Image (cartoon, helix red, strand yellow):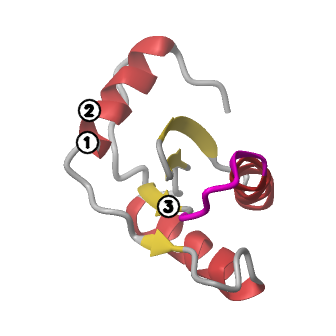
Amino acid sequence: MKLSNKQKQFLKGLAHPLKPVVQLGANGLTEGVLAEVESALEHHELIKVKVPTDDREEKTLIMDAIIRETNAEKLQVIGHTLILYRPTEECKIELPKK
C-alpha cells in the first residue's frame, strides 16, 4: 500500500484528536500487544500506539516490529506515539484521490 502525500496529510489530520488506543506496558512488545494492535486496526483503521520508553533505539525497534507484524502504514511518529493506518475490507475512511 502506497499513500500519496495528500492522503498522508489527510490521515494525520484525522489522527490529531485521537487518543492512543494501545499502550505498551512494562513487558514491552508481547503477542498480546500485537493482537490488540491488530484488533484496533480492524476496528478503527487509524490508530495511535504509545511506546513509553526512554531508549530511542529500543523505541525505534519496537515501532518497526509493530509496523512489520501488522502490515500497517506508518504515518507519523510524535515523541512516544506512533500513528498507524491500515484499510479494512469496508474502507471506513474515505481517502482523497491521489
Q: Residue at x 43, y 56 (%)?
A: 48
In the rendered structure, find residue 13 and report the number of the disc placed on it: 2
Quick one: label 2, few (<14), some, or many (20+) residues within 10 Å?
Answer: few
Q: Work out whether residue 39 or residue 56 is closer to the camera in this orientation and state it.
A: 56
Q: Quadrant of residue 8?
A: top left
Question: Which residue does the numbered mark 1 point to in the structure image?
Answer: 16
Magenta highlight range? 52-57
Main SS of the magenta part reads loop
From the viewer's perspective, is the residue at label 2 or at label 3 nearer? 3
User: Which label was assigned to residue 49?
Assistant: 3
Q: Relative to residue 56, is residue 39 depicted above or below? A: below
The label shown at residue 76 is none
Instruction: Tell me how far mark 2 sits from mark 3, CA to CA.
Output: 16 Å
Q: Is residue 93 magenta?
A: no
Q: Marks 3 and 2: in contact by CB < 8 Å?
A: no
Q: Residue at x 65, y 25 (%)?
A: 2
**Residue ID at (39%, 63%):** 44
Disc 3 element: strand
Q: Is residue 48 left or right of residue 24?
A: left
Lower position in the chain sequence, tag 3 or tag 1: 1
Question: Relative to residue 31, is residue 39 drawn left or right?
Answer: left
Please indicate, yes or no, whether residue 98 appears anywhere in the rendered image. no
Asked if disc 2 and disc 1 are in contact, CB closer than 8 Å, the reply is yes
Classed neighbour count for the residue bearing mark 3: other residues with Cα under 10 Å, few (<14), some (14–19), many (≥20): many
Amino acid on which the number 3 mark rests in the picture: Val
Q: Farthest residue in the left direction?
A: 17
